[in-house]
Image (cartoon, helix red, strand yellow):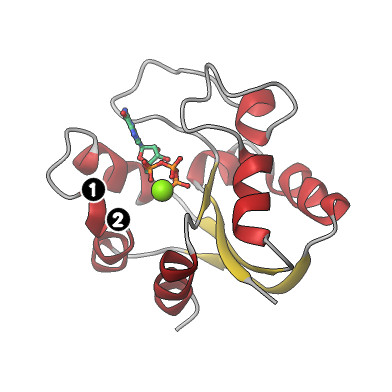
């Protein structure tokens, strides 16, 4: 069975949406394998977001991710990588489809980085790499 890394990012935790997000994941039928509240340092975030280094939103993204705790979730199920990204919706919360986590709970707050509540690994390779970072 496949596994993925899900993060409820600092905006989701601060807004008290962790439970609502977990409820959607559980209702969809995926299995929680591990879950923890994490306060990552800059080094861990730089590893996690290595692919975005140099992009205009990279520094604001790291600052945002350092602004408060996140909830890291190891999630399992057939095609869970694809399935969770479908639950999450597209990256930009303004246009993410209603019915998705980002579409229902997110919006543009006029900040330098999109605050879009959740992260989900985008491939089997990313999932393996990211799970090793967050569940070392
Ligand atoms: P994750 O599941 O968080 O990885 O989201 P994603 O795969 O939909 O997006 P991506 O990996 O491309 O970008 C990582 C994060 O950077 C996003 O979730 C946003 O928070 C932020 N981000 C990505 N693209 C943009 C952008 O064009 N502008 C801004 N301001 N932020 C962005
Ligand atoms: Mg991504």
Residue lying at the far bottom in this picture: please name it.
136
Residue at the image position 62 percent from the left and 40 percent from the top: 88
Relative horizontal placement of residue 10, taking residue 80 as reference (left or right): left
Whether label 1 lies within 8 Å of ligand 1 gets the answer yes
Relative horizontal placement of residue 20, taking residue 73 as reference (left or right): right
Q: What is the crowding at mark 2: few (fewer than 14 residues within 10 Å), some, or many (at least 20)? A: some
User: Does 112 sit above or below residue 134?
Assistant: above
Residue 36 shows in the view? no
Q: Position of residue 134 (x, y in %)?
A: 46, 72
Q: What is the crowding at mark 1: few (fewer than 14 residues within 10 Å), some, or many (at least 20)? A: few
Badge 1 element: helix
User: How far apart are the alpha carbons under marks 2 and 1?
Assistant: 6 Å
Q: Nearer the viewer, residue 17 or 28?
A: 28
Quadrant for the N terminus in the image: bottom right
Residue 57 shows in the view? yes
* Residue carrying label 2: 49
Q: Position of residue 28 (x, y in %)?
A: 83, 51
Badge 2 element: loop
Residue at the image position 65 percent from the left and 41 percent from the top: 86
């Amino acid at each position: 069975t496949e596994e993925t890394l899900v993060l409820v990012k600092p905006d989701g935790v601060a807004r008290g949406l962790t439970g609502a997000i977990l409820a959607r994941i559980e209702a969809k039928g995926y299995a929680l394998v591990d879950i923890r509240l994490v306060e990552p340092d800059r080094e861990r975030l730089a590893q996690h977001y290595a692919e975005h280094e140099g992009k205009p939103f990279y520094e604001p993204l790291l600052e945002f991710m350092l602004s408060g705790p996140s909830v890291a979730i190891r999630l399992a199920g057939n095609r869970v990588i694809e399935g969770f990204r479908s639950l999450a919706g597209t990256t930009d919360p303004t246009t993410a489809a209603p019915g998705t986590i980002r579409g229902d709970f997110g919006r543009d707050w006029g900040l330098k980085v999109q605050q879009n509540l959740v992260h989900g690994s985008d491939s089997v390779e990313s999932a393996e790499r990211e799970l090793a970072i967050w569940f070392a």
